[in-house]
Image (cartoon, rainbow, N blue to C red):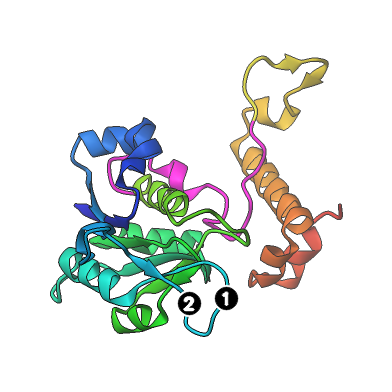
Amino acid sequence: MFRATVLTLYPEMFPGALGHSLAGRALSDGLWSLQTIQIRDFSTDRHRTVDDTPAGGGAGMVLRADILARAIDHASPANDRRPRLLMSPRGTPLTQARVRSLAEGPGAVVVCGRFEGVDQRVIDARGLEEVSIGDYILSGGEPAALVLLDAVVRLLPGVMGNQASGSEESFETGLLEHPHYTRPTQFEGSPIPEVLVSGNHAKIAAWRRQESERLTATRRPDLWAARPLDAQAKKRAPKA
């Protein structure tokens, strides 16, 4: 079973969205577990202080190494095989490949940063892998942790009714997903593309592939350029 442990100053933010829909049902069914740990419980003063001013000066406060280290050691002893992740805007961008590798593992220990950041010494000493969900700043790591766990949990065995859904989505093949249509066949004068109602599965598959390539080339040229495509495949990508 995938075991998630979240270290946070706001445990009341969990499970949040993870308590609903696919993730929530899977949590209730015991397909994964979620534990939250209050970092303040490992402070040593009566005010439960967890931060201090940055060395060298500057704005804001920094999460102390000693307090966070005690929380991590409590949550993840030496024999714990789960990766230790720190949600951080300077981290390695989260990709579908990393999400899938996490889903195939025993779980994750997720540290939610706050303030200006976390003392670098605890990041180094406890082997925290910094992970970012995008090039923007949040008020803390909790929303990012929710995003990461939602992406992972939906890939766990038994969570999605149709496992093929997970393998055909955007980023799974290095392409964005093709457009989708359903009833009614006519919407405000716009019909469903004829090929999708033709019953010709080979043509449908080819159309979907072409549309995925078109969308990727026009909307995410970085993804398109990174794909190991042959010359003919690159020629197929329509221009914007």
Q: Position of residue 146 (x, y in %)?
A: 41, 48
Give the label on residue 191, or none: none
Please tell me which residue is depicted at 37% across the width and 64% down the height of the picture: 101
Please tell me which residue is depicted at 31% across the width and 48% down the height of the picture: 156
Residue 162 falls within the magenta-colored stretch: yes
Please provide the residue range marked out in magenta. Answer: 156-180
**Residue 125 placement: quadrant:** bottom left
Residue hosting label 1: 58
For the residues labelled 2 and 1, the Cα–Cα distance comes to 6 Å
Q: Position of residue 172 (x, y in %)?
A: 52, 56
Give the amino acid at mark 2: Pro
**Residue 45 placement: quadrant:** bottom left
Report whether 13 appears left or right of 171.
left
Residue hosting label 2: 54
Q: Are marks 2 and 1 in contact (CB under 8 Å)?
A: yes
Report whether 68 appears left or right of 180.
left
Asked if residue 57 can be seen in this view, the reply is yes
Near-viewer residue (25 or 197): 25
Vertical placement of 52 versus 159: above or below?
Answer: below
